Image (cartoon, rainbow, N blue to C red):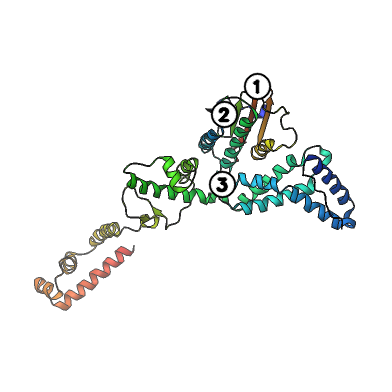
Amino acid sequence: MQQNTDERPWDRRRAREAFEQFAKVRAQGSRLANEYEQLRSDLVVAHLNLVRYLALKFVNRGEPLDDLIQVGTIGLLKAIDRFELERGVEFTTYATPTIVGEIKRYFRDKGWAVKVPRRLQELNLAVNRAVEKLSVEFGRSPSVAELAERLKASEEEILEAQEFGQAYNLLSLDTELSGDGDKTSQTLADHIGANDSELELFEDKANLDHAFKFLNGRERVILYLRFYESVSQTEIAKRLHVSQMHVSRLQQKALEKLRIVLKE
Amino acid sequence: MTQAVEPHDLADVVELSIPGKAEWVAVARLAISAVASRLKFSIEDIEDVRLAVAEACTDAIQRASGDAQIDISCRSDERALHVRIRRQGTMIKNESPESEDSVGNLGIFLVRALMDEVEYSVHPERGTDLAMVKYVEV
């Protein structure tokens, strides 16, 4: 295996020579497999700075730099394998879109377009919290610069988080809401609507009113006294001059009628 | 300028002029994300446009000398965002635009990788002129 002992800096000329050599070796196929691998890895190492430079441009989008460098390096490998000197463009010119494309694809595959940068989400919450805290501390609204200092973020990030953080957020139900002025921290779940039992009662009452129309006078009186006035069956029996057994039977019958009507 | 880079006549126009200094690039970034978010771009596209504008401004600052402002003009309709970034001034380095791969030019390569269409020129006396388009995906 031929060791590459070339110590010259990786300038344009050296890159071109390396690619010429690489193309020759590649053309030889498997016979020079070792040399091919060596050259390829030299080319990768020589251009890692380009990958890093490009990855850094995407680092504020919520993915770790190392991951971006890793996928960017895949792009670099593809670019190295596809690059043709005869086209007359510099390798960096050729490789940049490939590397950027790979990084962007990584974001797309992560479903990032709907997920939104975590950094923004978190910053948005942090900004809201810090606004409250600093307002109390200072007795006035904090400036953007003060918020940035407190949160160790840039002023641009603060503005951005305020502007866009909410618009694209997927929120957890346990997200604490920084209330407008009220100090109790409530979660989003606290604000989710439940069935309103009062409203259901109202609806039930309307239905019941309707069902009552199907009862005769005596049945209505019995149910009214029994359930609205909590009068005992014995008392009702006395008032209606019938036996308690009879009241019981009438009540059963009336309730049965109501059930039938309400079921419909 | 190719035909495709020309924006729609009825496009909405937002113009911004910032000092040709690195510390003002953030203002351009913020403004462009606000403009881009009015279109139906995904947040990823917005980030791309923002990065492209930042790179374009940085390039304009590095390439042209003097105190000239950077003029940023955005035209948008429902289909696309057109951004033109210009800076008057004499070129600092006497090199042809996009000549070879000096690190200074990587920014423009990046812009090309991020936007759908890019027209870029550097004139020895008239400074830099970059027009770029991002289409709204349908």
Residue name at image x 32 percent, y 55 percent: A184
Residue B84 drawn above or below residue A214:
above
- Which chain is indicated by disc 2? B
Query: A134 and A157: which one is in front?
Result: A134
Residue at far front of view: A7
Report the amino acid beneath label 1.
Answer: Arg
Name the spot of residue B114 as percent of width and height, x first: 64, 40
User: Which amino acid, by three-letter code, is at mark 3?
Assistant: Asn
Is residue A197 rendered to the left or right of residue A154? left
- Answer above or below: position of B120 versus A40: above
Q: Position of residue A71 (x, y in %)?
A: 67, 52
Instruction: Decide if residue A122 is on the left or right side of residue A259.
Output: right
Q: Which residue is mark 1?
A: B126
The residue closer to the viewer here, A249 or A97, is A97
In percent of width and height, residue A219 lies at 19, 67
Q: Residues within 10 Å of mark 3 (few under 14, many from 20)?
A: some
For mark 3, what is the residue? A60
Q: Callout 1: few (<14), some (14-19), or many (20+) C-alpha neighbours within 10 Å?
A: some
Quick one: B115 or A209, which is closer to the camera?
A: B115
Q: Which residue is mark 2?
A: B20
